[in-house]
Amino acid sequence: MADSLLALRTSLAEQLAELRGVQPDQLPPALLDISVRRVGDAYYVCPADWEQLRHEEGGAGRPIPYWARPWPSGVALAGHLKDHPPAENLKVLELGCGLALPSVVAARAGAQVLATDGHSDAVAFAAHVLSINEVEGDVALVDWSDHAGHLVDRGPWDLVLAADVLYTSQNVEAALRLFPHLVAPTGTLLLADPNRKGAQGFLAAARAKFELVSDRGPDVTLHLLTPRNG
Ligand SMILES: C[S@@+](CC[C@H](N)C(=O)[O-])C[C@H]1O[C@@H](n2cnc3c(N)ncnc32)[C@H](O)[C@@H]1O
């Protein structure tokens, strides 16, 4: 393994183990069999064999590692931000960031980024993804369906990003409760979604509080929501 990949692996192993509260040699092997890949002009580091990681996590009774691959919605949201970069110093929050490609693009434009996920492995990988792209950004472990208070306290946010996170009814309900408290009155919520039913339910209810413009694609739709005044 090349020296830089070995250093990345060592650094990841330490953080992953610390966040999981285990020794590095207790981590699933597929978690540390990593590769560095590229989408557009952003690099990301991820477990090389997602199916194998899913298999190992499932065997240990742990949840499916949805965070561990870039999904079409995350890639589409990153592409949108590249074409429409946020202004410098804009306060940007990404929810359910997984490998955090949208956060990389926003940070590269000069935004102040906080990338969050409810899975500790995702947070460790997201920090390294920001780092290998040589951009500044914070990461935090936050499950917004039950511990979102400090996201509200750190807000309001000029831009809230979320790609493919509305796939459980629990998340849809939590999103309806939380998102209106995160977005600044002049801010924007940008949702990328692979045309799931859950997103339709969210959007139908969210219209009470947000103006909605959707750019529908065959695989991913981008929804831009801005708070209604008053
Ligand atoms: C399908 S993946 C999408 C990952 C990334 N946004 C992308 O599009 O590539 C869903 C992500 O949302 C995270 N997630 C799901 N529910 C969450 C919640 N309630 N709080 C925080 N993160 C959550 C998962 O851990 C996972 O990283």
Image (spheres, helix red, strand yellow):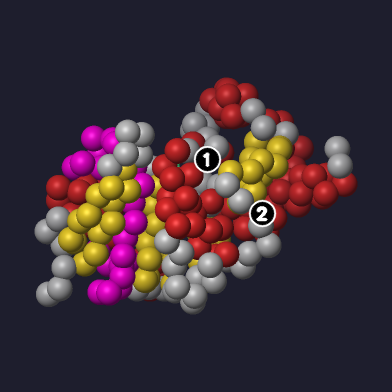
Asked if residue 196 can be seen in this view, the reply is: yes
Residue 151: quadrant of the picture: bottom left
Residue interval drawn in magenta:
180-201
For disc 1, the marked residue is 70
Q: Position of residue 74 (x, y in %)?
A: 46, 45
Judge whether 229 appears above or below 11 on screen.
Answer: below
Mark 1 crowd level (few <14, some 14–19, many ≥20, 10 Å Cα): some
- From the Cβ of disc 1, is ligand 1 less than 8 Å away? yes
Q: Earlier in the sequence, mark 1 or mark 2?
A: 1
Q: Position of residue 96 (x, y in %)?
A: 44, 50
What residue appears at the point 38 percent right and 66 percent down from the top-left corner? 159
Q: Amino acid at mark 1?
A: Pro
Judge whether 32 appears above or below 136 on screen.
Answer: above
Disc on res. 128 = 2
What residue appears at the point 58 percent right and 44 percent down from the top-left corner? 39
Number of marks in the image?
2
Q: Position of residue 102 (x, y in %)?
A: 49, 54
Q: As drawn, is 134 to the left or to the right of 148?
A: right
Q: Amino acid at mark 2?
A: His
Residue 93: quadrant of the picture: bottom left
The one nearer the camera, 168 or 102, is: 102
Judge whether 94 appears above or below 12 on screen.
Answer: below
